[in-house]
Amino acid sequence: MGQEESHSEEMDLAQIQDLCIIFMKECPSGTLHLHEFKRIFGVPSSSEEESLYIETLFHSFDTNQDNALDFIEYVAALNLILRGNIEDRLKWSFKLYDRDGNGRLDRHEVKLIIRILHKIKFQKTNVSSMTPSQICDRIFELVDQNADGQITLSEFMEGAQKDEWLMNLLKLDVDAKGWVIQNCGKTS
C-alpha cells in the first residue's frame, strides 16, 4: 500500500541535476538559507500555511541544525522528497511531527501539523469534513496502541501501513514533488 506512485511523477536524473545546478547558481557559497529555499521551491510569501510548511521541511533537512542547508543536505532532501520509498518518507514525516525531538508524538504536535495540512491540503480540495481536532482524535484512536496519549515511531509506522486514509495523511504528501517539478527552472 502506498507504493503505487506513478513513474511519470518521478523525477529523472536530469531533473535532479538541473536542481543541483540551480543550487550552485543560487548558492555559490555552498549553503542554502530559508529565504533561498522558499524562493527555489516557489513558496509564495502570501501563503502563511505553505510558508510554515516549507519552514518545517527546511528544518527537518538541516541535520546539523546550523540554519542552512549545505549541498549534501540539499541532495539528501531532494532524494527523499522525489525518490524516497514510503518507509523513509514515513520516518521523515514522524520527525516533522515530533517538534520537540523526544521520539514520541503528543496531541499538541500532531494537531499543529494537522492544522497546517488542513489549510493547505483539505480546504483547497474540500476532501475532509473533519476538523483538525477530529482528525487528531482519529489518528490517536487508530495508532496509539497502548493508549498512553503518545505515539512512538513503531506505532506511527504500523498504523500508517494498516490504514490507507492514515497513510495518506501521515506521509505528509502535500505535493512536494509538484512544487519541485513546477519550479525546477523558475529561478534561472
Image (tube, grey):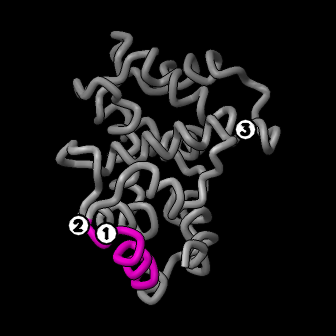
Residue at which label 1 appears = 75
State the CA–CA distance, disc 1 to disc 2.
5 Å
Residue 91 at what x, y percent from top left? 33, 46
The circle on residue 72 is 2
Q: Which residue range is magenta in the image?
A: 17-30
Residue 126 at what x, y percent from top left? 82, 38
Q: What residue is shown at x 45% (from left), y 56% (from top)?
A: 37
| Circle 2 crowding by C-alpha within 10 Å: few under 14, some 14–19, many from 20 | few
Q: What residue is shown at x 64% (from left), y 70% (from top)?
A: 182
Q: In this view, does 19 lie to the left or right of 174?
A: left
* 96 lies above or below 21: above
Task: Identify the residue at the far left of this view.
Answer: 64
Q: What residue is shown at x 39% (from left), y 53% (from top)?
A: 89
Residue 87 at what x, y percent from top left? 35, 54
Which of the pair 55/175 is nearer the observer? Answer: 55
Of badges 2 and 3, the one in the foreground is 2
Which of the pair 161/20 is nearer the observer? Answer: 20
Q: Which amino acid does label 3 sit on?
A: Phe
* Mark 3 vs 1, N-terminal side: 1
Name the quadrant containing residue 27: bottom left
Is residue 105 in the magenta section? no
Residue at which label 3 appears = 122
- Disc 1 and disc 2 in contact, CB within 8 angstroms: yes
Name the quadrant containing residue 159: top left
| Circle 3 crowding by C-alpha within 10 Å: few under 14, some 14–19, many from 20 | some
State the CA–CA distance, disc 2 to disc 3.
33 Å
Q: What residue type is labelled 1?
A: Val
Q: Is mark 3 on a helix, strand or loop?
A: helix
